[in-house]
Image: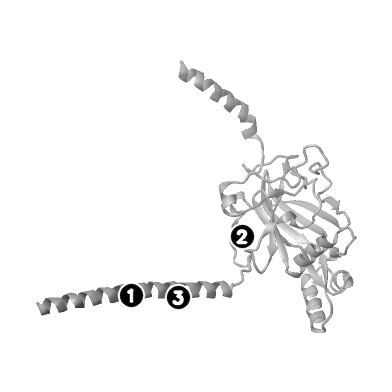
Amino acid sequence: MTKKLFAIPLLAAAIHNMPLLANADEYNHRYKEGDHVDLWVNKIGPYANPQEAYEYYVLPYCAPDTRHHPDNEGGSWNALKAHSIGERLGGHALRHSGHDLIYPGATPSQSGVLETCTTAPLTVDQVRLFATAAEDQWFYQMYVDDLPVWGMVGEMLPDLDAAKGEHFGNDLSHLEEAVAKHSENGGEFKAYVYTKRTLHVSYNADRIIKVDLTSEPSSLTEVKTGATLKFELDVQWAKTTTPFHSRFDRYLDHAFFKHQIHWFSIFNSFMMVLFLMGLVALILLRTLRKDYARYNLTNTATIGV
């Protein structure tokens, strides 16, 4: 009788949770038309030193004007995600971006959705934060359906025309040439922030397959005290025939990641190994010397007897 009474609450709980299990979300990686897809922001930090990482909203980014806005009831902007064990071990700090992505149907009618937000007038400290991020080449990481994308916060450029001129267009390589030429001439650099980003999401039936993020060089805006920044996110959906099981193959390509060799870390580890080996050798020598001296005293006493 006790077992039957115990089974009733379990059965009721299972029946109650069945609709939840059937829902499409980022945990079963299946979506249907009209479902909301979460865009999470993760760590941010210098490109040359990935170990130095901060939370995304350490920079004064604004909340998009969507249903997730903090002024709206139930808004989830900047809400911390319930991390899995793997995410905790990886040191992730996923927070909701506030953007409202809607999964398209057979035809990507939701393609080209533009979401915007405008910051309050920047303070001196906020300008200093953006300037540091641009000077140290900070990059950020976002996640859509467990697929990561990366983007740069800003650039150090000679002037606004160098970023928006027709000669440079939207090709970052030309921007690098402009920066190199200006640096040779000893010119002054200013901090600019990317204010428009385009999120390209490719999907196959009810699954998200590929995510790319591009920052528009023409949107580079100089950060000044008292100025406001208008950030834009253009969400582009496109159909693809790539199967779901191979969506992580592109991340395994060596050309995808440009890992830098941290020579200082290697040298530091090598010197630490040498120090530990020398310490162990010194302890062994002292121990062996004492044992050898004790052995000689024993032999001398035996011969004397």
- Amino acid type of disc 2? Tyr
Q: Name the residue under label 3.
A: 274
Q: Write the residue at 56% across / 71% down.
A: 265
Image vertical order of residue 128 relative to residue 204, above or below: below
Which marked residue is nearer to the observer: mark 2 or mark 3? 3
Q: Upstream in the sequence, badge 2 or badge 3? A: 2
Which marked residue is nearer to the observer: mark 3 or mark 1? 1
Instruction: Residue 51: give x, y in percent of width and height.
Output: 62, 63
Tell me whether the residue at label 3 lies in contact with that at label 1, contact meaning CB atoms closer than 8 angstroms. no
Determine which quarter of the picture holds residue 215: bottom right
Q: How far apart are marks 3 and 1 (CA)?
A: 18 Å
Q: How far apart are marks 1 and 2 (CA)?
A: 52 Å
- Amino acid type of disc 1? Arg
Element at label 1: helix
Image vertical order of residue 164 relative to residue 121, above or below: below
Q: Mark 1 points at which residue?
A: 286
Q: Mark 2 points at which residue?
A: 251
